Amino acid sequence: MSFVMGLNPMRTTGIKQLWRRACRFVAAAVAVVTISQPAYALIELDITQGNVEPMPIAISPFAGSGLQEDVAGQISQVVAADLQRSGLFRPIDPAAHIQQEMNVGTMPRFGDWRTIGSQALVTGSIAQQANGQIRAEFRLWDVFAGQQLIGQQFFTTPENWRRLAHIISDAIYQRLTGEKGYFDTRVVFIDESGPKDARRKRLAIMDQDGANVRYLTRGDDLVLTPRFSPVSQEVTYMSYVGGNPQVYLFNIETGQREVLGNFPGMTFAPRFSPDGQKVIMSLQQGSNANLYLMDLRTRRTTRLTNTAAIDTSPSFSPDGRQVVFESDRGGSQQLYVMNSNGSGAERISFGPGQYSTPVWSPRGDLIAFTKVHQGRFMIGVIRPDGKGERILTEGYHNEGPAWSPNGRVLTFFRDTVGEQGGPQVWTVDLTGYNEQLVQTPNFASDPAWSPLLD
Amino acid sequence: MSKTLFARGARFAAVVAVCLVAAACSQTRPELTSGNSSVAAGSGQDFVVNVGDRVFFLNNQSSLDGAARGVLDKQAQWLQHYKNYSITIEGHADERGTRQYNIALGARRAAAVREYLVAKGISPSRIKTISYGKERPVAVCNAASCWSQNRRAVTVLNGQ
């Protein structure tokens, strides 16, 4: 019995470096596994079709020794929760597992796993190292082929156990779907507390599953619409600091904040360019809002639109060549696509109702939006050429979609009616069938996804 | 030069006219404003109670209707008289729109009020504007009656 299992010669260095190495190791291990795969009899999940039947998968509770017993069980639970929430997998209740008490070295009795209808099996072990770190190993098995698909190990500090679980989930997701995962990511959002007519809003960040909420501002100033940099641990957002609403840049690691540019009016609705080097935003002057681009290195600003209208919510295509935005230049809010130098704007939304908050998928194939029609607020997607509009969710108030880094899931906020009502963060996948609430400590709005962490 | 003098003269005439009207309404208090007499004339409370500090808008609109123009005419007269105040016009939207657009819509409403007051002779240097979009509702029920109260522009006095 031989396993594709790399050894990772770790030295005691900073957590971040360790994680970079761990991630590189993931890539290497996956590559090795891929090469060793024969082209037959392997389970695969096609997620390009609508309404996929979730794949039954067994995640055997990870084995732990001594101190790590609790952590081991929790890691396998987080993996199961990640996979379940994706809507693509149906983890089988561990109580129904016939083969119990497995560790990463236990050979599966594949017949037992087939009996309970499992197509894939995950096993793992967590062990305490002498230096205080933990070693985590896991394997993904194809139950029908009786074959290992992935074998990997990681070293990290015990506090990092949730990230470890998400990295394992991503590896499983990628191996079985052929697409990159999105579990080892974070979401920046606005935490909302207090009564509806005196809301306190704080910039906050959490893991994509709602864990590890951390507050980045104290709530003294109104803050809105944070967006993650695609390349760094930075966020751009709008703040009313000093009673002067402007777009800011915030460094999550250092906590430093700086105003972007010296504009003669309110700036809002910021978003990074795909290379992270520029921020596109609206500038309000009198009755009109126009779009501007600011180069973060040279600090030069370029005006992109010049209309007697409200042009806002700009979002770049992933190749950086085009920008989608909303404008009421034609009388009501509609979506327009223009070249990134501001030329050639063309309307792409023509259905009944108002279209707003467009955001271009990181895959480039779709634009997500909020649509308001007859008092109903919907989240939908449309192709950049204006064809193929689909509504994914619809109700009293759904607003502000943002894409997962793999372009398969949207996060947005849903508000509820009345004085006690408030927004919560949800996700919906591209089929529209899999809606999930993200549990947050308070009301929460304006979610935006980070890229995959490194 | 002579134009400026004339403008000043015109403004003075307007104030005098208002004083006369006010005096007619309230014989015992020959002051600018009428109405609640327990409120000190020229105070912030006077402005809110006797003049009216806010105007309202139709859904997705920023145009001023007759009622709004009436309130703003009174605001302009009051501000002509009490020249030591500067003002901030706060533009707001209701919750039944998307966030970014509502920020711009609130700004558009504040701009409409600003333009009107400037046309009525209030110096632009006394006026600041800010938009809160849908972030600062005053009425929180889930009904058209509440949403219409939130679609507003509020003139806030900035200290004497």
Image: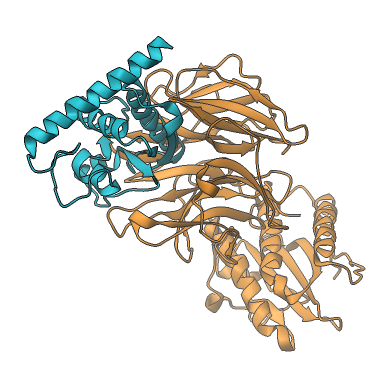
Chain colours: A orange, B cyan
In the image, residue B141 above or below residue A400:
below
Quick check: A153 left or right of A228?
right
Q: Which of the 4 quarters of the picture holds residue A269?
A: top right
> Foreground: A304 or B9?
B9
Image location (x, y in percent) of residue A160: 71, 70
The single residue placed furthest to the bottom in the displayed view is A66
Residue A405 visible, this orientation: no
> Foreground: A319 or A213?
A213
In the image, residue A108 above or below residue A275:
below
> Foreground: A186 or A116?
A186
Q: Residue at x 27, y 24 (%)?
A: B12
Image location (x, y in percent) of residue A424: 43, 56
Q: Residue at x 59, y 78 (%)?
A: A98
Quadrant of the drawing holding the C terminus of chain A: bottom right
Image location (x, y in percent) of residue A112: 62, 73
Q: Which of the 4 quarters of the picture holds residue A419?
A: bottom left
Residue B95 visible, this orientation: yes
Quick check: A171 left or right of A424?
right
In the image, residue A339 above or below residue A10:
above
Quadrant of the drawing holding the N terminus of chain A: bottom right
Quick check: B42 left or right of A49?
left
